């Protein structure tokens, strides 16, 4: 993707192989960062969905008198038919159960470590609620059911927002592609029209300014299309 972007920009705006190489390097740094952020967000969404399912099984186990440690162990066995060992929640459950059995680590510690590493506020809030219920003797089952309901509502709201914003994202992509398509048409249909941009230093400066403005518009549109709950 970076090579394609760099070569296209270098050819359309600068008509230079050296400029294409520089554009490839810049595009790689930008695409890599965006891809990493996107990948992290996708993994967090998957983990949150799986954690919601985990809460259902924990609630069922707590309702019949199981402790949290026993509920986690039963959840690992219960979800084996739905999730594989490669799924995030199964890896986390296996690690937590192993710590509690082999190192005699308390469920509070393993859950706190899980919440910290996940980076998800909902998991952290659930752990805090569990710790408060354990120390104060509050109704654990009611707290778990309430947490499950809140996470489910949040996921449903996020899905509705993503559906609503899909059209806006598509429109923004079209707007961002328009300058490149226009340059391509001029490059193919009227080769001499763009020669002033590649024949002098002033032309290169104008091309660079245009690219900077397109980049600023891209950043602005991406921020406008991001809604965080």
Image (tube, grey):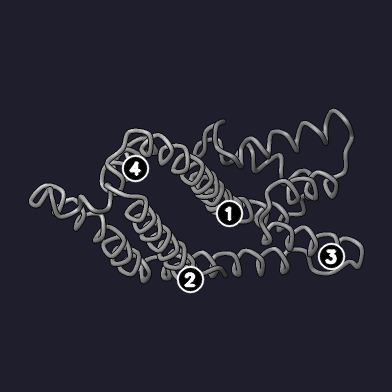
From the viewer's perspective, is 1 left or right of 71? left
- At 49% from the left and 67% from the top, the residue drawn is 223
Which mark is nearer the camera, 3 or 2? 2
- Crowd rating for badge 1 (residues with CA inside 10 Å; few <14, some 14–19, many 20+): many
- Residue depicted at x 36% and y 71%: 164
Query: Distance of mark 1 from mark 3, alpha carbons?
Result: 22 Å
Q: Do callouts 4 and 3 mark residues in contact (Cβ within 8 Å)? A: no
From mark 2 to mark 1, how far is it between C-alphas?
A: 14 Å
Q: Callout 4: 10 Å neighbours few (<14), some, many (20+)?
A: some
According to the picture, the residue beneath numbered tag 3 turns out to be 133
Mark earlier in primary sequence (3, 2): 3
Task: Give the residue pinned by disc 2.
Answer: 157
CB-based contact (under 8 Å), mark 1 and mark 4: no
**How far across and down, in percent of the image, does residue 89 sit?**
61, 42
**Of callouts 1 and 3, the N-terminal one:** 1
Hey, which quadrant is residue 74 in on the image? Answer: top right
Within 10 Å of disc 2 (Cα), the crowding (few <14, some 14-19, many 20+) is: few
Tag shown at residue 48: 1
Q: Nearer the viewer, residue 34 or 17?
A: 17
Mark 2 and mark 4: Cα distance apart in space: 35 Å
- For mark 1, give the secondary structure: helix
Quarter occupied by the N terminus: top left
User: SS for tag 4?
Assistant: helix
| Cα–Cα span, label 3 and label 2 | 28 Å
């Amino acid at each position: 993707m970076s090579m394609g972007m760099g070569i296209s920009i270098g050819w359309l705006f600068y008509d230079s192989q050296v400029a294409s190489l520089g554009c490839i390097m810049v595009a790689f740094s930008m695409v890599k960062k965006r891809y990493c952020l996107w990948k992290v967000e996708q993994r967090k969404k998957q983990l949150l969905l799986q954690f919601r399912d985990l809460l259902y099984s924990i609630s069922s186990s707590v309702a019949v008198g199981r402790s949290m440690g026993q509920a986690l162990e039963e959840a690992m066995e219960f979800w084996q038919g739905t999730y594989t060992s490669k799924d995030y929640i199964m890896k986390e459950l296996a690690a937590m159960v192993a710590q509690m059995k082999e190192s005699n680590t308390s469920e509070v510690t393993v859950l706190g470590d899980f919440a910290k590493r996940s980076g998800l506020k909902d998991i952290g809030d659930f752990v805090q609620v569990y710790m408060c219920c354990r120390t104060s003797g509050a109704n654990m089952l009611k707290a778990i059911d309430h947490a499950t309901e809140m996470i489910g509502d949040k996921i449903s709201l996020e899905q509705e927002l993503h559906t609503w914003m899909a059209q806006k994202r598509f429109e923004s992509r079209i707007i961002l592609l328009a300058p490149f398509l226009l340059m391509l048409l001029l490059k193919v249909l009227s080769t001499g029209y763009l020669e002033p941009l590649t024949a002098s230093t002033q032309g290169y400066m104008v091309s660079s300014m245009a690219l900077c403005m397109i980049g600023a518009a891209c950043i602005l549109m991406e921020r406008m299309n991001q809604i965080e709950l």
